[in-house]
Image: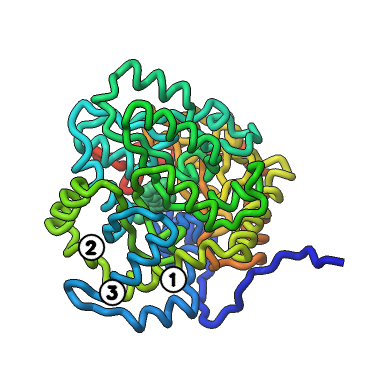
Amino acid sequence: MAIKTIIEPFKIKSVEPIRWTTRADREKLLRQAHYNLFQVPARDILIDLLTDSGTGAMSTAQWAAMMEGDESYAGSSSFDRFRRGVQDIFGYRHVIPTHQGRAAERILFGVMCKKGDVVPNNSHFDTTRANIEFVGAEAADLLIPEGYEPANRHPFKGNMDVAALEQLIARVGRERIPLVMLTITNNSGGGQPVSMENAKAVRDVCRRHEIPLYFDACRFAENAYFIKLREKGYERKTPKEIAKEMFALGDGCTMSAKKDGLANIGGFLCTNDDQLAQQEKDLLILTEGYPTYGGLAGRDLEAIAVGLGEALEEDYLRYRITSTAYLGNHIAGQGVPIVQPPGGHAIYLDARAFLPHIAPQQFPGVALAAELYLEGGIRSVEIGTLMFGDAAHMDLVRLAIPRRVYTQSHIDYVIEVMLEVWRQRERIHGLRLTHEAPFLRHFTARLEPL
Ligand code: F0G
């Protein structure tokens, strides 16, 4: 008989204590933070599900590789290993290291976009949208309609609406669309995957109109594993084979190595276009660093080169996807409304359904995140009206799971806290803004309860 229990595929060599606070402490801390969890010091958080970005635990192999870091300014051997590691999976001709994903975005859009352009995506993440808008271009979300329905169990809710893409190109003209992007997995829409079939259909449209296709590849390994689990014809392929097949459809990518690079910092920009690569490297030198380190230490490049391979290991991905689903299925089983099916890196609570008595203008997602902190010291993040303003289609609260960090008993604790908040949901109030920045306002916004 085959053993069915799925365990964490690692043992723990180094531990980091976490600190308890009382409810009274947390009430005070939250007031001081103006009800914005970004403003709460990490030492006052018990379980930190703010993000899966840069918060993962590195492996012994990664730490060992870091000791090989070549810190030469130019032409370091760490860069050679990094480039080989990236190209082995992504396959693009040029690999440009950056300090994280948004630096790759800024350089890509700075070189490819101008005022009046439109950049379609399944769903732009906040930094992607902000970097496009920063150069005066428009960020268009073209997610399939199912992607906006939290309860809909479509297996590939990250897919792009291909007909909508055709219509957009017909409406604004090919000249105004410098590139099309696909975000794998779709973070803003619930960590949902994009199917190979959809990526191919998007690629076909792009080919026909001679528009380059770029991937926002942050969680490419999780996306590949979902394809293996859910898409016909991929059951026997390895996650690496699937990832390679997907990237071969595109002309380049942006990547935050803080996610499926299993590193604490880093990113890169890839392209097959020699001329663009030259312009991108020129811009890189101006703000990030020389093209063989791009704002990273040689040891960071080493950690990423090893991490990308580990993120594609099947034991790891099985544990990763199963443990995220464990949280989602346990709370959904008790009636808590979540984006279905559970995503790869996070569970997203549907705050509008959780708190139907709070209007979107009163930030139901922020209110719910505040309550999870008060009840159990859990930090989550709103992805909704505070983050996206009127462009928000949903009000979600994301519980992002750091990679290889928390055990099942931590997650059992989160489930217990969540169910307590669910029982008391009618007592939760909305909030109003008292301060906001001109862009990416969610990081620094101040709020007060109504
Ligand atoms: N694209 C996606 C889909 C992302 O999720 C992120 C980051 C980025 C780009 C930017 O990468 O942070 O390295 O500059 N997402 C993090 C998150 C911050 O919490 O989801 P970065």
Q: Is residue 305 visible?
A: yes
Question: Residue 246 in the image: x percent, y percent?
Answer: 48, 46
Q: Nearer the viewer, residue 251 or 45?
A: 251
The residue carrying pointer 2 sits among few (fewer than 14), some (14 to 19) or many (20 or more) residues within 10 Å by Cα, namely many
Image mark for residue 294:
2
**If the image is split into quadrants, where does the N terminus sit?**
bottom right
Residue positioned 50% across, 57% down in the render: 49
Q: Nearer the viewer, residue 368 or 226?
A: 226
**Which callout, 1 or 3, points at the residue further toward the start of the chain?**
3
Q: Secondary structure at mark 3?
A: helix
Q: Secondary structure at mark 1?
A: helix
The residues bearing labels 2 and 3 have C-alpha atoms spaced at a distance of 10 Å
Question: Residue 23 in the image: x percent, y percent?
Answer: 54, 59
Where 192 falls versus 325 (above or below)?
above
Q: Nearer the viewer, residue 345 or 267?
A: 267
Q: Which residue is mark 3?
A: 298
Q: Which residue is mark 1?
A: 306
The residues bearing labels 1 and 3 have C-alpha atoms spaced at a distance of 13 Å
